[in-house]
Each structure stands twice: as C-alpha cells, then as structure tokens.
Amino acid sequence: MLEVRNLHAWYGESHILHGVDFDVREGEVVTLLGRNGAGKTTTMKSIMGLVPQRSGSIRLRGRETIELRPDLIAHAGIGFCPEERGIFASLSVTENLMLPRVVASGGLDLDTIYALFPNLRERANSPGTKLSGGEQQMLAIARILRTGAKLLLLDEPTEGLAPVIVQQIGRTIREIKQRGFTVLLVEQNFRFAQTVADRHYIMEHGRVVDMVANAELAASMDKLHDYLGV
Ligand code: ATP
C-alpha cells in the first residue's frame, strides 16, 4: 500500500529525516515508535506533503507521491489526523462530519459513521468545544473515514487520554482494520501500540533502525527497552 524509500526532510537548514525506509501493507496497522524528536511526526507530515522540503520516494499503491501537493495526496487516498486533531470548535459533531470533501469512493456515510461511533451519535448536536478529548479524537478519525481515504495516518491518538478512553480508541482502530482500512500510527504509548498493531518500526535520529512484528514483541523486550526506554 505504502512504500517509503530513502526519505529525507528538512525544516529550513535543519535536516530532520536521514533516509527513512519502511512499508505498510494493505489492511495492516503499523506503528512508528521512537523517543521524542526521533522524527515520527515529521515522517507523517512528509507523507502528507506538509514538510517544506523533502526528497526520496513515497509510493501509494505504486504511484509516486513525493512531488504532489497535500490536497492531491489526500485525493490519492491518504487521510491525516494530526496530534492537535483539528476539530472545528464552533461546529456541531454532525457539521464537522459533513465538512470533509469526499476524495475517493468508499467514504462512509453518516449512518455508518454513527454506527461505528455510537458515542458521537449521542453528541451529534454538541459543538466541538463541548467534546471531551476522547470524543474529539473519535471525531477526527471519523472525519477521515468520511473522505474515502483508505490509508489513515494517526499521530498519537491516545495522547492525554484516560486509560478507559485509550481502550475505546484501540477498539475503534481494530474495527477500522476489520473494515479493510490501513493504518499508520505514531505512538508514544507502547502498551497501546501492542494492542492494535501488526508490526512496529523503531525510529531513531531521523531513521528507521529496526522492525518488530507484534507477535515477536515479547522476545524483543530487551531491544525495545534500549530503543525506547520502556
Ligand atoms: P515527538 O513525539 O516529540 O513529536 P517525533 O518523533 O514525532 O517526536 P518530530 O516531531 O518529527 O519528532 O521532530 C523531529 C525533529 O524535528 C525534532 O528535533 C524537532 O525539534 C524538529 N522539528 C519538528 N518540527 C519542526 C519545525 N516545524 N521546525 C523546525 N524543527 C522542527
């Protein structure tokens, strides 16, 4: 689904990514793990075309996207949910869900979204300002599902959320996967990553330095401890 090869990215003079390589297969949930500043968010923003200068290759279903503008990358079928979530505070939940432009066939209709996120249905008329952090995160994910994007990039969806809400987000991600969506997840919460992902890429200093299959995690704890301090 996604092939990232020799990806470099710069913010001005700062060279942040130094040749990132990884793949995400269709239908997988894959995480980027790493300490603060390793380059996880910059990798996601580079995939979405939101970093001012980048080079290398980013192929979506074989199509090169490295030169495309962010709106065309969205049209190619990638949806990005940033850490700050980007909910329109003055609009209701339903209005937030009606806003996204459908970029590809297969975007979920409102009834399907509300069946997937029953807590959002209960809050359908509430303005964004009245939503809890967890509800905002659900809404941000739901909005992407409206667009028809088949690959979702989620940047730290569990950040700042209570454990019970983190579990809900986990259930949501597993359900999205069952529906055939592909998810690339940036996470600091290693325990959470373990409950949702098929594979994990470890990033250090702007590079992917290792890959661990979820099934092999238990045997890789020492290595992960060194990389992540968990
Ligand atoms: P975190 O969880 O702390 O966000 P991360 O792995 O996602 O970690 P990035 O946010 O990708 O890391 O940041 C990688 C490096 O790029 C850091 O050194 C950061 O200071 C720098 N950086 C990030 N955004 C910018 C920016 N807009 N301008 C300049 N430098 C930036």
Image (cartoon, grey):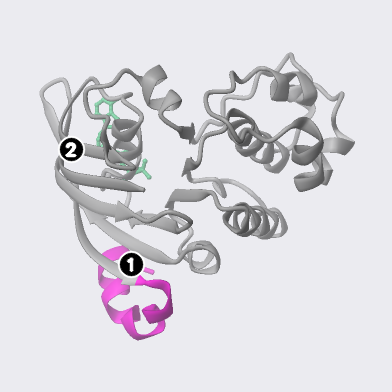
Q: CA distance from mark 2 to mark 1?
A: 31 Å
Callout 2 secondary element: strand
Return the mark for residue 57.
2
Q: Is residue 21 magenta?
A: no
The one of 9 and 132 positioned closer to us in this rendering: 9
Callout 1 secondary element: loop
Q: Amino acid at mark 2?
A: Ser
Horizontal arrangement in the rendering, residue 180 relative to residue 125 (left or right): left
The one of 202 and 161 positioned closer to us in this rendering: 202
The one of 61 and 35 positioned closer to us in this rendering: 61
The residue mark sitting in front, 2 or 1, is: 2
Q: Quadrant of residue 203?
A: bottom left
Q: Position of residue 218 (x, y in %)?
A: 41, 83
Residue lying at 60% horizontally and 54% vertically, measured from the top left? 173
Q: Position of residue 151 (x, y in %)?
A: 46, 42
Return the mark for residue 229.
1
Ligand 1's quadrant is: top left
Q: Position of residue 206 (x, y in %)?
A: 19, 46
